[in-house]
Amino acid sequence: MATWLAIFGIYSVLGVVLMLSTDNPLFYSHLAYAIFLCPLIAISVALITRRHGRGREELGLRWGNPARTISFGGLGALAAVGMSYAAFFLVYFAFYLLAGRTPVSAESEQLRGLGGGHLALTLLVTVVLAPVFEELFFRGLFYPTLRKRVGVWGAIVLNGVIFGALHMQPIFMLSLVLVGMALAFLYEKTESLAAPMLAHSMYNLAVVLIAVLTGG
């Protein structure tokens, strides 16, 4: 676990450096995600599963019943969008009451400024790479370990909290905690990564489209 936290920590620090030193931090952070974080996750998953004798089935790398996977994935995505935006509006309202102004999401502003190849890379990372590699770690490897130690509901909550915290987005942290909990619940119910991967992908796509089309 310490190794994983170090990996995500290094990536987060890299994101901060890119934000402060480049004119297009969102693009370069997504580029770093694709060429740095994804290979590290893949190598780590391979090494850990080999070391502990875990196979694809134990990671949840099974498709299962297609109709069940699609229905759970779609409903999970709807639930994640609903919960996350409800939480965001609560944070938004609380921030306004306390600070007298509305919070500004730099990432949303940067998303609206992307075009062409930059937007294509963003969609590749957020809709394809992130759902696959993050689900491999957070639900495939990390969640079963937590479940053995703290039980199902304790693992769902703790998995969501760590998922939200490691994304390093204070305004959206509560939203991401709820999303992580929803994805862990999907994994628990289906015993497969297919449904949470699908829900994660659909959720990310919805967030990008909402940010680009509405400016939210």
Image (cartoon, helix red, strand yellow):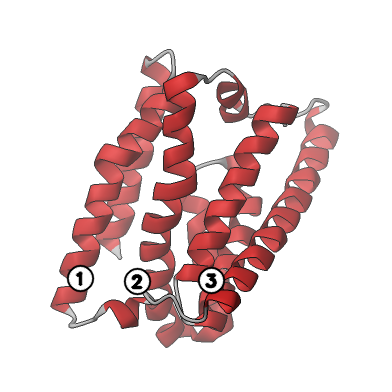
Q: Is residue 65 above or below residue 184?
A: below
Name which residue type carries label 3: Ala
The residue indicated by pointer 3 is 184
Q: Residue at x 58, y 44 (%)?
A: 205
Secondary structure beneath dot 2 equals helix
What is the spatial separation of the Cα atoms under label 1 and label 2, in whole angstroms? Answer: 9 Å
The residue indicated by pointer 2 is 141
Answer whether labels 1 and 2 touch (C-beta < 8 Å).
yes
Q: Which tag, 3 or 2, sits closer to the chain's start?
A: 2
Q: Is residue 60 above or below residue 129?
A: below
Name which residue type carries label 1: Ile
Q: Position of residue 198 (x, y in %)?
A: 53, 61
Q: Nearer the viewer, residue 174 or 112?
A: 112
Q: Residue at x 39, y 48 (%)?
A: 129
Locate the N terminus by quadrant: bottom left
Q: Which mark is residue 48?
A: 1
Secondary structure beneath dot 3 equals helix
Q: Which tag, 3 or 1, sits closer to the chain's start?
A: 1
What is the spatial separation of the Cα atoms under label 3 and label 1, in whole angstroms? Answer: 20 Å
Give the quarter of the image for residue 178: bottom right
